[in-house]
Image: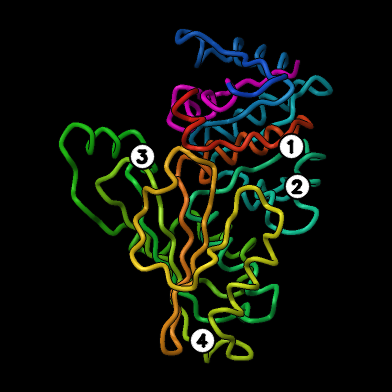
Amino acid sequence: MASVFIDGEAGTTGLGIRVRLARMDGVELISLGEADRKNETARLAAMRESDVTVLCLPDEAAVQAVAMAESLGDAAPKILDASTAHRVAAGWVYGFAELAAGQAEAIAAARLVANPGCYSTGAIALLRPLIAAGMLAADADVMINAISGYSGGGKAMIAAHDSDGGPAFELYALGLRHKHVPEIMKYGGLARRPIFVPSVGHFRQGMLVSMPLFLDRLSGAPSAYEISEVYREYFDGSLRIRPSVGLNAGNLEPEALNNTDLLEIFVCAQGGQAVLVARLDNLGKGASGAAVQNIALMLGLPDPLLTAKEFADA
């Protein structure tokens, strides 16, 4: 029986991980009572006892937690960090199993794994295959738009929407330095900073990440069908990432994959223009679902893919 300790289990991502771990055979959860969740001695003991420690903490606290774990020396657990702190840091493996050939194996062998950001997951899924295929230049002018449910905004935003209703829609991070941009660039394959415009809607969870393109600006001026084929070939065999069979999706709403660990890719094109869209649950493949996928890899267990029905039954 493998053991997992979630440092910060009371937060949104931590709770999602708990639900998913409860479905997994061969995994035991180490849990601290509310009085001990900030007790360094109790946390250190839980880390020592665990095979994998998951950090669902703010960035600064995550850095401190890693230092605590490292102080255990040979008794230190493997660490999966769900914060932003280590996603582009040296010595850490990026926890996007479908990123490239061999990435899942690298996660399985790693002692330090950084869980991807939710927006980053959608953006990288759109970018990486096109850049790897030579269709999109690494230094291309790229614009990425995204909308997320308010559960991705932290405790203050969740409280505001739950209690006061919150705004129906708002753009944010208009300083154009959103914290997910570095990992989008590094793992998406971009050499030039994209214009990334995230937004929040008054719905709890769900996400759309979209990228508009002029097809004649791409290498070889590919058709929408050829772009779709790149995605299908790149993610062939993935249980979680599903490129759309159709080329024009019509209307897309962000909540269709809620309570699942799936990601869908749509290629919508007309008259030499295209909009590429990734749809996912920001709490599923965008956070807790990806975390548990990485935990399974780190423990040598089967992929615990979660569907909506299984989530409802959990």
Which mark sits nearer the N-terminus, 2 or 4? 2
Name the spot of residue 25 as percent of width and height, x first: 69, 20
Residue span colored magenta: 1-22
Three-letter code, disc 3: Ser
Residue 104: image tag = 2
The residue identified by callout 4 is 215
Is 303 placed above or below 96 here? above
Q: Residues within 10 Å of mark 4 (few under 14, many from 20)?
A: many
Other residues around mark 2 within 10 Å, as few (<14) / some (14–19) / many (≥20): many
Does 222 appear in magenta? no
What separation in Å lies between label 3 and label 2 (alpha carbons)? 28 Å
Is there a contact, CB below 8 Å, between mark 1 and mark 3?
Answer: no
**Colour mapping:** rainbow
Q: Earlier in the sequence, mark 4 or mark 3?
A: 3
Discs 1, 2 touching: Cβ within 8 Å: yes
The answer for how far apart the CA atoms under marks 1 and 2 are is 7 Å
Q: What's the mark number on residue 151?
A: 3
Q: Which residue is mark 1?
A: 297
| Picture residue at 40% right of the left edge, 52% below the top | 207
Q: Residue at the spot x=65%, y=50% of the render?
A: 96
Q: CA distance from mark 1 to mark 3?
A: 26 Å
Q: CA distance from mark 4 to mark 1?
A: 37 Å
Structural distance between the alpha carbons of marks 4 and 3: 35 Å
- Quarter of the image with the N terminus is top right
